[in-house]
Image (spheres, rainbow, N blue to C red):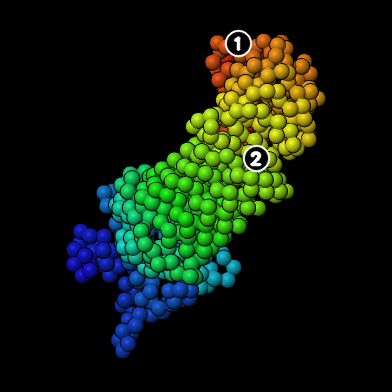
Amino acid sequence: SLNLLEDEATPQGKAIRWIVCDDSISVQLLENQDPATGNLPKQKHGFRLGGDAGEAQVIRRYILAVFSYSTSKVSPWNDSLNFLSADLHECNWHKNYTRSNFPFGDFDPVGVSCQDELDGNMLLDDYQYPVEFMMVNIRIANDLNGPLPTEIGYLMDCRSLMLENHLRLTGPLPQTMGNMAGLFSVALLLNGPNFGGELPSSLFQLNYLNTIHIQDNLGKNWSLPTNVQVSDDTQLERLLLVRNSFAGIIPPWIAKLKQLQTLDLSMNNFQGAIPETIGDLSSVKYLNLLGNNLTESIPSSLGKLSEIDALILGENALQGELPASIGTLRTLQLLDVGSNELTSTIPSSFANLESLSEYTLFNETLCFKLDTHSSNNISLLLISSEYLVLESNSLNGTVDVLESMKNLTVLLTRSNSFSGALPDGLFSGTSDNVVVDIGDNKFTDELPTSFANMSYLVSLFGPKNSFADNATQSSVCDNSTLLVMDCDACECCDVCCDGENDGVCDFQLDGRAVLGYDCGAWYEYCVRGADYFAEAGNELLSYT
Protein backbone atom coordinates (compact mmCIF):
# COMPACT_ATOMS: atom_id res chain seq x y z
CA SER A 1 0.00 0.00 0.00
CA LEU A 2 0.99 3.64 -0.34
CA ASN A 3 1.29 3.92 3.43
CA LEU A 4 3.96 1.20 3.48
CA LEU A 5 5.92 2.94 0.74
CA GLU A 6 5.77 6.29 2.53
CA ASP A 7 6.93 4.84 5.85
CA GLU A 8 10.73 4.87 5.87
CA ALA A 9 10.79 2.19 8.60
CA THR A 10 9.02 -0.51 6.58
CA PRO A 11 10.82 -2.93 4.22
CA GLN A 12 8.74 -1.46 1.40
CA GLY A 13 9.69 2.11 2.33
CA LYS A 14 13.37 1.22 2.57
CA ALA A 15 13.25 -0.64 -0.75
CA ILE A 16 11.58 2.13 -2.74
CA ARG A 17 14.07 4.70 -1.43
CA TRP A 18 16.95 2.40 -2.37
CA ILE A 19 15.49 2.04 -5.88
CA VAL A 20 15.08 5.75 -6.59
CA CYS A 21 18.10 7.05 -4.69
CA ASP A 22 20.86 4.43 -4.49
CA ASP A 23 20.31 1.74 -7.11
CA SER A 24 22.31 2.96 -10.09
CA ILE A 25 20.71 0.45 -12.50
CA SER A 26 17.16 1.47 -11.59
CA VAL A 27 18.06 5.15 -11.44
CA GLN A 28 19.50 5.02 -14.97
CA LEU A 29 16.33 3.37 -16.28
CA LEU A 30 14.12 5.90 -14.52
CA GLU A 31 16.15 8.88 -15.73
CA ASN A 32 15.87 7.68 -19.34
CA GLN A 33 12.11 7.35 -19.33
CA ASP A 34 10.55 8.12 -22.71
CA PRO A 35 8.80 11.47 -22.19
CA ALA A 36 6.24 10.70 -24.88
CA THR A 37 5.15 7.23 -23.76
CA GLY A 38 6.37 7.13 -20.19
CA ASN A 39 8.05 3.78 -20.89
CA LEU A 40 11.45 2.91 -19.49
CA PRO A 41 14.29 1.71 -21.76
CA LYS A 42 14.18 -1.98 -22.49
CA GLN A 43 16.54 -4.48 -20.93
CA LYS A 44 19.20 -6.07 -23.16
CA HIS A 45 17.36 -9.39 -23.49
CA GLY A 46 15.20 -9.68 -20.38
CA PHE A 47 13.51 -12.75 -18.91
CA ARG A 48 11.36 -15.41 -20.56
CA LEU A 49 8.23 -14.74 -18.49
CA GLY A 50 8.85 -11.19 -17.28
CA GLY A 51 9.80 -9.86 -20.70
CA ASP A 52 12.38 -7.23 -21.57
CA ALA A 53 10.60 -4.07 -20.39
CA GLY A 54 12.69 -1.83 -18.16
CA GLU A 55 9.77 -1.61 -15.74
CA ALA A 56 10.05 -5.38 -15.16
CA GLN A 57 13.66 -5.07 -14.06
CA VAL A 58 12.94 -2.20 -11.67
CA ILE A 59 10.05 -4.15 -10.13
CA ARG A 60 12.19 -7.29 -9.85
CA ARG A 61 14.96 -5.39 -8.05
CA TYR A 62 12.37 -3.74 -5.79
CA ILE A 63 10.90 -7.12 -4.82
CA LEU A 64 14.32 -8.54 -4.02
CA ALA A 65 15.15 -5.43 -2.01
CA VAL A 66 11.91 -5.81 0.01
CA PHE A 67 12.82 -9.46 0.61
CA SER A 68 16.26 -8.44 1.87
CA TYR A 69 14.94 -5.73 4.21
CA SER A 70 12.03 -7.86 5.46
CA THR A 71 14.30 -10.75 6.39
CA SER A 72 16.79 -8.40 8.05
CA LYS A 73 14.19 -7.20 10.53
CA VAL A 74 16.36 -7.53 13.64
CA SER A 75 19.87 -7.65 12.23
CA PRO A 76 21.67 -7.89 8.86
CA TRP A 77 22.29 -11.25 7.22
CA ASN A 78 25.56 -12.96 8.06
CA ASP A 79 26.53 -12.58 4.40
CA SER A 80 24.86 -9.98 2.17
CA LEU A 81 25.28 -12.37 -0.81
CA ASN A 82 25.66 -9.22 -2.99
CA PHE A 83 22.03 -8.25 -2.35
CA LEU A 84 21.43 -4.50 -2.83
CA SER A 85 24.58 -4.18 -4.93
CA ALA A 86 23.61 -1.09 -6.93
CA ASP A 87 26.00 -1.70 -9.83
CA LEU A 88 25.37 -5.45 -10.22
CA HIS A 89 22.62 -7.05 -12.25
CA GLU A 90 20.26 -8.92 -9.91
CA CYS A 91 21.41 -12.23 -11.47
CA ASN A 92 24.77 -11.51 -9.82
CA TRP A 93 23.32 -11.13 -6.32
CA HIS A 94 24.90 -14.30 -4.99
CA LYS A 95 28.12 -15.77 -3.61
CA ASN A 96 29.61 -19.01 -4.89
CA TYR A 97 30.08 -21.68 -2.27
CA THR A 98 32.02 -24.87 -2.92
CA ARG A 99 30.34 -27.72 -1.10
CA SER A 100 28.27 -30.79 -1.84
CA ASN A 101 24.70 -29.55 -2.02
CA PHE A 102 22.00 -31.04 -4.24
CA PRO A 103 21.11 -30.09 -6.96
CA PHE A 104 24.29 -28.11 -7.69
CA GLY A 105 26.93 -30.75 -6.95
CA ASP A 106 30.05 -29.13 -5.49
CA PHE A 107 29.10 -25.71 -6.88
CA ASP A 108 26.44 -23.87 -4.89
CA PRO A 109 25.53 -20.30 -5.89
CA VAL A 110 23.85 -18.94 -2.74
CA GLY A 111 21.49 -16.03 -3.33
CA VAL A 112 19.90 -15.17 -6.68
CA SER A 113 21.21 -17.04 -9.70
CA CYS A 114 19.98 -17.18 -13.29
CA GLN A 115 20.22 -19.55 -16.24
CA ASP A 116 20.05 -18.84 -19.93
CA GLU A 117 17.27 -19.88 -22.26
CA LEU A 118 19.45 -21.74 -24.75
CA ASP A 119 21.61 -24.30 -22.94
CA GLY A 120 21.05 -23.76 -19.22
CA ASN A 121 24.36 -22.00 -18.54
CA MET A 122 24.55 -19.75 -15.51
CA LEU A 123 24.19 -16.06 -16.33
CA LEU A 124 25.36 -13.02 -14.35
CA ASP A 125 23.17 -10.68 -16.41
CA ASP A 126 20.99 -10.59 -19.53
CA TYR A 127 23.42 -8.61 -21.68
CA GLN A 128 24.25 -11.41 -24.15
CA TYR A 129 21.47 -13.96 -23.69
CA PRO A 130 17.87 -13.95 -22.49
CA VAL A 131 17.31 -15.36 -18.99
CA GLU A 132 15.21 -18.51 -18.82
CA PHE A 133 14.62 -18.38 -15.07
CA MET A 134 16.06 -17.29 -11.74
CA MET A 135 16.50 -19.20 -8.47
CA VAL A 136 16.47 -17.87 -4.92
CA ASN A 137 18.70 -20.30 -3.04
CA ILE A 138 19.77 -19.46 0.51
CA ARG A 139 20.53 -22.90 1.86
CA ILE A 140 23.14 -21.81 4.33
CA ALA A 141 22.80 -20.59 7.91
CA ASN A 142 22.65 -16.93 6.92
CA ASP A 143 20.35 -15.71 9.73
CA LEU A 144 17.42 -14.49 7.70
CA ASN A 145 15.20 -12.93 10.37
CA GLY A 146 11.65 -11.70 9.95
CA PRO A 147 8.77 -12.71 7.65
CA LEU A 148 8.70 -13.48 3.95
CA PRO A 149 7.05 -10.42 2.36
CA THR A 150 3.98 -10.68 0.17
CA GLU A 151 5.99 -9.08 -2.64
CA ILE A 152 8.02 -12.27 -3.13
CA GLY A 153 4.93 -13.81 -4.70
CA TYR A 154 5.39 -11.53 -7.71
CA LEU A 155 8.76 -12.96 -8.75
CA MET A 156 7.15 -14.62 -11.75
CA ASP A 157 10.51 -15.66 -13.21
CA CYS A 158 11.57 -17.48 -10.03
CA ARG A 159 11.89 -21.21 -10.72
CA SER A 160 13.07 -22.37 -7.28
CA LEU A 161 12.74 -20.96 -3.78
CA MET A 162 15.05 -22.69 -1.31
CA LEU A 163 15.53 -21.49 2.28
CA GLU A 164 17.38 -23.57 4.84
CA ASN A 165 18.77 -23.17 8.35
CA HIS A 166 17.28 -19.80 9.29
CA LEU A 167 16.19 -20.00 12.91
CA ARG A 168 14.74 -16.48 13.01
CA LEU A 169 12.45 -16.62 9.99
CA THR A 170 8.87 -15.89 11.07
CA GLY A 171 5.32 -16.15 9.82
CA PRO A 172 3.61 -18.21 7.12
CA LEU A 173 4.21 -18.42 3.40
CA PRO A 174 2.40 -15.53 1.69
CA GLN A 175 -0.78 -16.31 -0.23
CA THR A 176 0.65 -14.29 -3.13
CA MET A 177 2.92 -17.20 -4.03
CA GLY A 178 0.11 -18.31 -6.30
CA ASN A 179 1.28 -15.60 -8.72
CA MET A 180 4.70 -17.25 -9.25
CA ALA A 181 3.82 -18.65 -12.66
CA GLY A 182 7.33 -20.03 -13.28
CA LEU A 183 7.76 -21.71 -9.90
CA PHE A 184 8.93 -25.32 -10.24
CA SER A 185 10.10 -26.20 -6.70
CA VAL A 186 9.88 -24.95 -3.11
CA ALA A 187 12.27 -26.29 -0.45
CA LEU A 188 12.02 -25.03 3.15
CA LEU A 189 14.24 -27.01 5.51
CA LEU A 190 15.52 -26.71 9.08
CA ASN A 191 14.05 -23.29 9.77
CA GLY A 192 13.05 -21.84 13.13
CA PRO A 193 10.24 -22.17 15.68
CA ASN A 194 8.29 -19.07 14.57
CA PHE A 195 8.21 -19.99 10.91
CA GLY A 196 5.15 -21.74 9.57
CA GLY A 197 1.39 -21.61 9.23
CA GLU A 198 -1.27 -22.80 6.86
CA LEU A 199 0.21 -23.40 3.42
CA PRO A 200 -1.32 -21.00 0.89
CA SER A 201 -4.03 -22.67 -1.15
CA SER A 202 -2.82 -20.74 -4.18
CA LEU A 203 0.44 -22.73 -4.09
CA PHE A 204 -1.45 -25.87 -5.13
CA GLN A 205 -3.02 -24.09 -8.07
CA LEU A 206 0.25 -23.37 -9.86
CA ASN A 207 0.33 -25.37 -13.08
CA TYR A 208 4.12 -25.57 -13.40
CA LEU A 209 4.96 -26.44 -9.77
CA ASN A 210 6.58 -29.88 -9.51
CA THR A 211 7.91 -30.17 -5.93
CA ILE A 212 7.01 -28.88 -2.48
CA HIS A 213 9.55 -30.02 0.12
CA ILE A 214 9.03 -28.75 3.68
CA GLN A 215 11.05 -30.72 6.24
CA ASP A 216 12.51 -30.51 9.74
CA ASN A 217 11.23 -27.03 10.49
CA LEU A 218 10.68 -26.21 14.16
CA GLY A 219 7.45 -24.22 13.85
CA LYS A 220 4.32 -25.67 15.49
CA ASN A 221 1.63 -23.99 13.37
CA TRP A 222 1.94 -25.85 10.07
CA SER A 223 -1.25 -27.09 8.42
CA LEU A 224 -2.70 -27.81 5.01
CA PRO A 225 -5.56 -25.66 3.70
CA THR A 226 -9.01 -27.14 4.17
CA ASN A 227 -10.25 -26.42 0.66
CA VAL A 228 -8.30 -26.04 -2.57
CA GLN A 229 -9.66 -25.76 -6.08
CA VAL A 230 -7.03 -27.88 -7.81
CA SER A 231 -6.58 -27.18 -11.50
CA ASP A 232 -6.81 -30.06 -13.96
CA ASP A 233 -3.45 -28.86 -15.33
CA THR A 234 -1.61 -29.16 -12.02
CA GLN A 235 1.78 -30.87 -12.50
CA LEU A 236 2.75 -31.37 -8.83
CA GLU A 237 4.66 -34.66 -8.59
CA ARG A 238 6.33 -34.49 -5.17
CA LEU A 239 4.73 -33.30 -1.92
CA LEU A 240 7.06 -33.89 1.03
CA LEU A 241 6.01 -32.48 4.41
CA VAL A 242 8.28 -34.39 6.79
CA ARG A 243 8.86 -33.82 10.53
CA ASN A 244 7.25 -30.39 10.79
CA SER A 245 4.42 -30.77 13.35
CA PHE A 246 1.76 -30.44 10.64
CA ALA A 247 -1.60 -30.88 12.37
CA GLY A 248 -5.24 -31.35 11.39
CA ILE A 249 -6.71 -33.83 8.96
CA ILE A 250 -5.33 -34.99 5.63
CA PRO A 251 -7.70 -33.06 3.37
CA PRO A 252 -9.56 -34.97 0.65
CA TRP A 253 -8.55 -32.48 -2.06
CA ILE A 254 -5.03 -33.99 -2.10
CA ALA A 255 -6.53 -36.78 -4.19
CA LYS A 256 -7.05 -34.28 -7.01
CA LEU A 257 -3.28 -33.96 -7.51
CA LYS A 258 -3.40 -36.46 -10.35
CA GLN A 259 0.28 -36.21 -11.28
CA LEU A 260 1.50 -36.80 -7.72
CA GLN A 261 4.14 -39.56 -7.54
CA THR A 262 5.56 -38.98 -4.05
CA LEU A 263 3.41 -38.10 -1.03
CA ASP A 264 5.38 -38.09 2.23
CA LEU A 265 3.54 -36.71 5.27
CA SER A 266 5.53 -38.73 7.78
CA MET A 267 6.39 -37.79 11.36
CA ASN A 268 3.80 -35.04 11.87
CA ASN A 269 0.63 -34.70 13.93
CA PHE A 270 -1.99 -35.43 11.28
CA GLN A 271 -5.08 -36.98 12.82
CA GLY A 272 -8.41 -38.46 11.85
CA ALA A 273 -9.03 -40.97 9.09
CA ILE A 274 -7.02 -41.53 5.94
CA PRO A 275 -9.39 -40.08 3.34
CA GLU A 276 -11.08 -42.64 1.14
CA THR A 277 -10.31 -40.44 -1.85
CA ILE A 278 -6.58 -41.08 -1.45
CA GLY A 279 -7.07 -44.13 -3.64
CA ASP A 280 -7.63 -41.76 -6.55
CA LEU A 281 -3.91 -40.89 -6.64
CA SER A 282 -3.45 -43.04 -9.71
CA SER A 283 0.17 -41.94 -10.32
CA VAL A 284 1.55 -42.18 -6.78
CA LYS A 285 4.52 -44.50 -6.31
CA TYR A 286 5.61 -43.63 -2.76
CA LEU A 287 3.05 -42.94 -0.02
CA ASN A 288 4.40 -42.45 3.50
CA LEU A 289 2.12 -41.55 6.45
CA LEU A 290 4.43 -42.98 9.12
CA GLY A 291 4.38 -41.56 12.63
CA ASN A 292 1.16 -39.53 12.80
CA ASN A 293 -2.03 -39.84 14.86
CA LEU A 294 -4.21 -41.36 12.17
CA THR A 295 -7.19 -43.43 13.32
CA GLU A 296 -10.09 -45.52 12.02
CA SER A 297 -9.62 -48.17 9.36
CA ILE A 298 -7.28 -48.38 6.38
CA PRO A 299 -9.41 -47.42 3.35
CA SER A 300 -9.98 -50.19 0.85
CA SER A 301 -9.52 -47.61 -1.90
CA LEU A 302 -5.76 -48.00 -1.47
CA GLY A 303 -6.17 -51.05 -3.67
CA LYS A 304 -6.60 -48.66 -6.61
CA LEU A 305 -3.03 -47.35 -6.33
CA SER A 306 -1.94 -49.22 -9.42
CA GLU A 307 1.55 -47.61 -9.60
CA ILE A 308 2.48 -47.86 -5.91
CA ASP A 309 5.96 -49.07 -4.96
CA ALA A 310 5.98 -48.22 -1.24
CA LEU A 311 2.99 -47.87 1.10
CA ILE A 312 4.04 -46.91 4.63
CA LEU A 313 1.30 -46.46 7.25
CA GLY A 314 3.20 -47.50 10.39
CA GLU A 315 3.22 -45.91 13.85
CA ASN A 316 -0.33 -44.60 13.85
CA ALA A 317 -3.52 -45.78 15.60
CA LEU A 318 -5.19 -47.45 12.63
CA GLN A 319 -7.79 -50.07 13.53
CA GLY A 320 -9.86 -52.82 12.01
CA GLU A 321 -8.94 -55.06 9.13
CA LEU A 322 -6.18 -54.94 6.61
CA PRO A 323 -8.02 -54.42 3.31
CA ALA A 324 -7.98 -57.37 0.96
CA SER A 325 -7.67 -54.89 -1.89
CA ILE A 326 -4.01 -54.31 -1.02
CA GLY A 327 -3.34 -57.81 -2.34
CA THR A 328 -4.08 -56.51 -5.84
CA LEU A 329 -1.19 -54.03 -5.85
CA ARG A 330 1.08 -55.79 -8.32
CA THR A 331 3.84 -53.14 -8.23
CA LEU A 332 4.09 -52.99 -4.43
CA GLN A 333 7.61 -53.42 -3.04
CA LEU A 334 7.25 -52.09 0.50
CA LEU A 335 4.17 -52.22 2.73
CA ASP A 336 4.48 -51.12 6.36
CA VAL A 337 1.42 -51.02 8.60
CA GLY A 338 3.37 -51.67 11.77
CA SER A 339 2.70 -50.21 15.22
CA ASN A 340 -1.03 -49.80 14.72
CA GLU A 341 -4.09 -51.46 16.27
CA LEU A 342 -5.07 -53.81 13.46
CA THR A 343 -6.93 -56.95 14.49
CA SER A 344 -7.36 -58.91 11.27
CA THR A 345 -5.65 -61.87 9.75
CA ILE A 346 -3.69 -61.57 6.54
CA PRO A 347 -6.20 -61.53 3.65
CA SER A 348 -6.01 -64.45 1.25
CA SER A 349 -5.55 -61.95 -1.57
CA PHE A 350 -2.03 -61.32 -0.29
CA ALA A 351 -1.05 -64.53 -2.04
CA ASN A 352 -1.01 -62.38 -5.18
CA LEU A 353 1.91 -60.43 -3.76
CA GLU A 354 4.20 -63.41 -4.34
CA SER A 355 4.76 -62.15 -7.86
CA LEU A 356 6.40 -59.05 -6.48
CA SER A 357 9.71 -60.82 -6.01
CA GLU A 358 10.12 -60.42 -9.75
CA TYR A 359 10.31 -56.60 -9.38
CA THR A 360 13.99 -56.16 -8.56
CA LEU A 361 15.71 -53.06 -9.91
CA PHE A 362 18.48 -52.05 -7.49
CA ASN A 363 18.59 -54.43 -4.55
CA GLU A 364 14.85 -53.87 -4.49
CA THR A 365 12.73 -55.36 -1.72
CA LEU A 366 9.17 -56.51 -1.37
CA CYS A 367 7.92 -56.09 2.14
CA PHE A 368 4.70 -55.96 4.06
CA LYS A 369 4.30 -55.42 7.74
CA LEU A 370 1.47 -55.76 10.22
CA ASP A 371 2.08 -54.90 13.84
CA THR A 372 0.23 -56.14 16.94
CA HIS A 373 -0.60 -55.22 20.47
CA SER A 374 -1.95 -58.62 21.49
CA SER A 375 -1.25 -62.27 20.76
CA ASN A 376 -4.44 -62.49 18.67
CA ASN A 377 -3.36 -59.80 16.25
CA ILE A 378 -1.34 -60.30 13.09
CA SER A 379 2.12 -58.79 12.92
CA LEU A 380 4.45 -59.18 10.00
CA LEU A 381 7.07 -57.28 8.03
CA LEU A 382 7.65 -59.57 5.10
CA ILE A 383 10.20 -58.73 2.46
CA SER A 384 10.12 -61.77 0.24
CA SER A 385 12.70 -60.57 -2.24
CA GLU A 386 15.61 -59.81 0.05
CA TYR A 387 14.77 -59.04 3.67
CA LEU A 388 12.33 -60.20 6.38
CA VAL A 389 11.88 -58.08 9.51
CA LEU A 390 9.44 -59.25 12.18
CA GLU A 391 11.10 -57.79 15.24
CA SER A 392 9.41 -56.49 18.40
CA ASN A 393 5.89 -57.86 18.00
CA SER A 394 3.74 -60.61 19.51
CA LEU A 395 4.06 -63.11 16.70
CA ASN A 396 3.86 -66.80 17.43
CA GLY A 397 3.84 -70.16 15.70
CA THR A 398 6.53 -71.56 13.48
CA VAL A 399 8.42 -69.85 10.69
CA ASP A 400 8.23 -72.80 8.30
CA VAL A 401 6.78 -70.60 5.55
CA LEU A 402 10.11 -68.79 5.33
CA GLU A 403 11.73 -71.86 3.80
CA SER A 404 10.15 -71.00 0.45
CA MET A 405 11.66 -67.49 0.41
CA LYS A 406 14.63 -68.32 -1.77
CA ASN A 407 15.94 -64.74 -2.01
CA LEU A 408 15.92 -64.09 1.73
CA THR A 409 19.20 -62.61 2.94
CA VAL A 410 18.25 -60.67 6.10
CA LEU A 411 15.95 -62.15 8.77
CA LEU A 412 15.11 -60.07 11.85
CA THR A 413 12.55 -61.65 14.19
CA ARG A 414 13.88 -60.47 17.55
CA SER A 415 11.41 -60.15 20.46
CA ASN A 416 8.43 -62.25 19.39
CA SER A 417 6.99 -65.61 20.49
CA PHE A 418 7.99 -67.77 17.54
CA SER A 419 8.45 -71.41 18.43
CA GLY A 420 9.47 -74.73 16.97
CA ALA A 421 12.54 -75.54 14.92
CA LEU A 422 13.92 -73.35 12.20
CA PRO A 423 13.19 -75.02 8.85
CA ASP A 424 16.08 -76.96 7.36
CA GLY A 425 15.92 -75.15 4.03
CA LEU A 426 16.08 -71.64 5.48
CA PHE A 427 18.48 -69.51 3.36
CA SER A 428 19.33 -72.52 1.23
CA GLY A 429 18.41 -70.67 -1.98
CA THR A 430 20.66 -67.65 -1.58
CA SER A 431 24.31 -67.11 -2.35
CA ASP A 432 24.38 -63.55 -0.98
CA ASN A 433 25.61 -62.51 2.47
CA VAL A 434 23.12 -63.48 5.17
CA VAL A 435 22.32 -61.58 8.37
CA VAL A 436 20.05 -63.14 11.01
CA ASP A 437 18.62 -61.83 14.30
CA ILE A 438 16.20 -64.36 15.79
CA GLY A 439 16.83 -63.52 19.45
CA ASP A 440 14.23 -63.40 22.24
CA ASN A 441 11.81 -66.03 20.90
CA LYS A 442 10.98 -69.67 21.74
CA PHE A 443 12.86 -71.49 19.00
CA THR A 444 13.87 -75.04 19.80
CA ASP A 445 16.05 -77.89 18.54
CA GLU A 446 19.26 -77.24 16.63
CA LEU A 447 20.16 -74.68 14.02
CA PRO A 448 19.32 -75.86 10.49
CA THR A 449 21.93 -77.86 8.65
CA SER A 450 21.83 -75.20 5.92
CA PHE A 451 23.46 -72.80 8.41
CA ALA A 452 26.43 -75.11 8.77
CA ASN A 453 27.01 -75.07 5.01
CA MET A 454 26.86 -71.32 4.49
CA SER A 455 30.16 -69.58 3.95
CA TYR A 456 28.25 -66.32 3.58
CA LEU A 457 26.57 -66.27 7.01
CA VAL A 458 27.81 -62.82 8.02
CA SER A 459 26.06 -62.33 11.36
CA LEU A 460 23.83 -64.54 13.49
CA PHE A 461 22.18 -63.33 16.71
CA GLY A 462 20.07 -65.97 18.43
CA PRO A 463 20.16 -65.44 22.22
CA LYS A 464 17.21 -65.80 24.63
CA ASN A 465 15.65 -68.83 22.95
CA SER A 466 15.08 -72.48 23.88
CA PHE A 467 17.56 -74.11 21.53
CA ALA A 468 18.95 -77.48 22.51
CA ASP A 469 22.31 -77.71 24.23
CA ASN A 470 25.10 -77.35 21.72
CA ALA A 471 22.57 -76.47 19.01
CA THR A 472 25.20 -74.52 17.09
CA GLN A 473 27.46 -76.58 14.85
CA SER A 474 31.15 -75.73 14.96
CA SER A 475 31.09 -74.99 11.23
CA VAL A 476 28.57 -72.18 11.92
CA CYS A 477 31.12 -70.61 14.25
CA ASP A 478 33.83 -71.06 11.65
CA ASN A 479 31.80 -69.51 8.82
CA SER A 480 30.19 -66.56 10.65
CA THR A 481 31.69 -63.12 10.82
CA LEU A 482 29.91 -62.52 14.12
CA LEU A 483 27.88 -65.02 16.12
CA VAL A 484 25.90 -64.50 19.35
CA MET A 485 23.84 -67.31 20.91
CA ASP A 486 22.87 -68.45 24.39
CA CYS A 487 25.96 -69.84 26.06
CA ASP A 488 24.46 -73.29 26.62
CA ALA A 489 23.47 -73.51 22.94
CA CYS A 490 26.88 -72.63 21.58
CA GLU A 491 30.15 -73.97 22.92
CA CYS A 492 32.12 -72.48 20.05
CA CYS A 493 30.78 -68.91 20.33
CA ASP A 494 33.23 -66.12 21.13
CA VAL A 495 30.32 -63.97 22.33
CA CYS A 496 27.35 -65.56 24.07
CA CYS A 497 24.41 -64.60 26.27
CA ASP A 498 24.63 -65.94 29.81
CA GLY A 499 21.41 -64.26 30.94
CA GLU A 500 23.27 -61.53 32.79
CA ASN A 501 25.11 -59.52 30.14
CA ASP A 502 22.29 -57.23 28.93
CA GLY A 503 24.48 -55.62 26.30
CA VAL A 504 24.81 -58.94 24.51
CA CYS A 505 21.45 -60.53 25.31
CA ASP A 506 19.31 -57.51 24.41
CA PHE A 507 21.06 -56.37 21.26
CA GLN A 508 18.52 -55.32 18.61
CA LEU A 509 18.73 -53.74 15.19
CA ASP A 510 16.51 -50.86 14.06
CA GLY A 511 14.49 -52.33 11.21
CA ARG A 512 13.40 -48.99 9.76
CA ALA A 513 16.96 -47.72 9.75
CA VAL A 514 17.97 -50.93 8.01
CA LEU A 515 15.36 -50.29 5.32
CA GLY A 516 16.63 -46.77 4.62
CA TYR A 517 13.50 -44.86 5.66
CA ASP A 518 15.60 -41.74 6.31
CA CYS A 519 16.11 -41.48 2.56
CA GLY A 520 12.39 -41.19 1.91
CA ALA A 521 11.34 -42.15 -1.59
CA TRP A 522 14.96 -43.11 -2.36
CA TYR A 523 14.92 -45.76 0.39
CA GLU A 524 15.99 -48.50 -2.01
CA TYR A 525 19.36 -46.78 -2.43
CA CYS A 526 19.83 -46.57 1.34
CA VAL A 527 18.91 -50.12 2.39
CA ARG A 528 21.72 -51.28 4.63
CA GLY A 529 23.77 -54.20 3.42
CA ALA A 530 25.45 -57.00 5.28
CA ASP A 531 28.45 -54.83 6.09
CA TYR A 532 26.25 -52.55 8.17
CA PHE A 533 25.04 -55.47 10.26
CA ALA A 534 28.53 -56.78 10.73
CA GLU A 535 29.81 -53.39 11.85
CA ALA A 536 26.91 -52.94 14.25
CA GLY A 537 27.44 -56.39 15.63
CA ASN A 538 31.13 -55.79 16.18
CA GLU A 539 30.15 -53.29 18.86
CA LEU A 540 29.01 -56.24 20.95
CA LEU A 541 32.58 -57.36 21.37
CA SER A 542 33.07 -54.49 23.80
CA TYR A 543 30.59 -56.13 26.18
CA THR A 544 32.65 -59.31 26.58
The amino acid type, in three-letter code, at marker 1 is Asp
Give the percent coordinates (x, y) of residue 132: 51, 69
- Left or right: 371 with respect to 90? right
Q: Is residue 446 visible?
A: yes
CB under 8 Å between discs 2 and 1: no
Give the percent coordinates (x, y) of residue 149: 31, 60
Q: Earlier in the sequence, mark 2 or mark 1?
A: 2
- Left or right: 417 with respect to 77? right
In this view, 65 is above or below 351: below
Looking at the rendered image, the quarter that the C terminus falls into is top right
Q: Residue at x 68, y 25 (%)?
A: 459
The amino acid type, in three-letter code, at marker 2 is Ile
Q: Residues within 10 Å of mark 2 (few under 14, many from 20)?
A: many
Q: Residue at x 27, y 52 (%)?
A: 73
Q: Residue at x 49, y 32 (%)?
A: 373
Give the percent coordinates (x, y) of residue 141: 40, 45
The residue beneath circle 1 is 498
- Furthest-right residue in this view: 453
The residue beneath circle 2 is 383
